[in-house]
Structure formats: structure tokens, C-alpha cells
Image (tube, grey):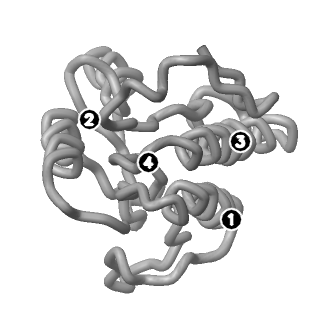
Amino acid sequence: FWDPARGEVGPGLESVDAVVHLAGAPIAEHRWTDAWKTTVRDSRVQGTRTLARALAGLPPKVFVSTSAVGFYGDRGDEPLDEASPAGTGFLADVGRAWEAEVQPAVDAGWRVSIVRVGLVISTHGGILGPLLPMFRWGLGGPVGDGQQWMSWVHLDDLVAMFHWLLTSDHAGV
């Protein structure tokens, strides 16, 4: 239906009432080589760019795009919210570039919302999928030194958030 690397979107978007964009290469399934980091960045930035440009040529509706809490960088105990500026580092750079790509849809009058998602937990997958077996086998333990902040959301709450964004008048992050 679409090829973000080529900037192509097939027919069919003109008949939709809303677009929820979740695509992007998984960040935790590979070693973070330079090549994989390029794949992670491009899958998010090019995909969002392709959709936003395609949507800009259609009558305005609703576009919900994801980003990630990595946008904030590692800020320790600093309280952060949607108005906090981007941090530093690879994930913050990806988040900043990713979010900027919705602009063509915004400029065309689409109601655009961005959700900065953290770790998704569910018994059906997400971050718990690879961790639960290790704990069941007695191999689980703290991740890191225990001082890292990990923003998480349950899949059901994330789905409810997307539903609210689709049916409310909210725009922005």
C-alpha cells in the first residue's frame, strides 16, 4: 500500500476519516550499530514524512502520529511533560526529526496529535514479552542499576488514548 523509502502512498487514503501512524523499526530487537540506528531513524522520519505529505493533498481530517519518550533524552530526576524541550542523544534527535515531519499535514489544516509513547506492557507482547520468560526461569533481575526512569503504558490505556485523540478536538503533543 505504501513505500516510505520511495515516498509513495497507494490509493485509498482519500476515503479514510483518520490516520493513526504507528510504523517504525523496533528499537530493541537489534544491536545499535550505525546501520541499525539509520534504519530506526529512517523508518520513523521517512514514514511520517510520506504520510504527512500525502495527507496534505486531501481534505483535512485527523492524523495521530506516534513519537517516543526518547524525545526527552536521559534527564534523570527532572520532571518532564509535553511542553518540555527535546533532550540530547540519538533517541532525542530521532524524536525531534520524527515529530517535525507532521508539519505538511498541520499546514494543510489536518488536526494532528502526537503521542510520545514509552514502553508498552501487555501479556500479549510489548516489553513484557521478552522479559517474562526470563523471570519464569529464575533468570530475571533489575534492568540496569535501578536508577533509570522507564516510562511505561499498558496497551489497553494506549488504545484508549488513541480513541480519545481520534474523537476529541485535541491537537499537538
Of the residues under marks 2 and 1, which one precedes in the sequence? 1
Of the residues under marks 1 and 4, which one precedes in the sequence? 4
Of the residues under marks 4 and 2, which one precedes in the sequence? 4
Separation of marks 4 and 3 at Cα, in angstroms:
13 Å
Of the residues under marks 4 and 3, which one precedes in the sequence? 3
Please say whether residue 91 is visible from this viewpoint.
no
- The residue beneath circle 4 is 66
SS of the residue at dot 1?
helix
Q: Which quadrant does the C terminus fall into?
A: bottom left
SS of the residue at dot 3?
helix
- The residue beneath circle 2 is 121
Q: Which quadrant does the N terminus fall into?
A: top right
- The residue beneath circle 1 is 93
Q: What residue type is labelled 2?
A: Ile
Of the residues under marks 3 and 2, which one precedes in the sequence? 3
The circle on residue 46 is 3
User: Which residue does the image show at 47% across and 54% down from the upper left?
Assistant: 68
Mark 2 surroundings: few (<14), some (14-19) or many (≥20) residues within 10 A: some
Q: Which of marks 3 and 2 is in front?
A: 3
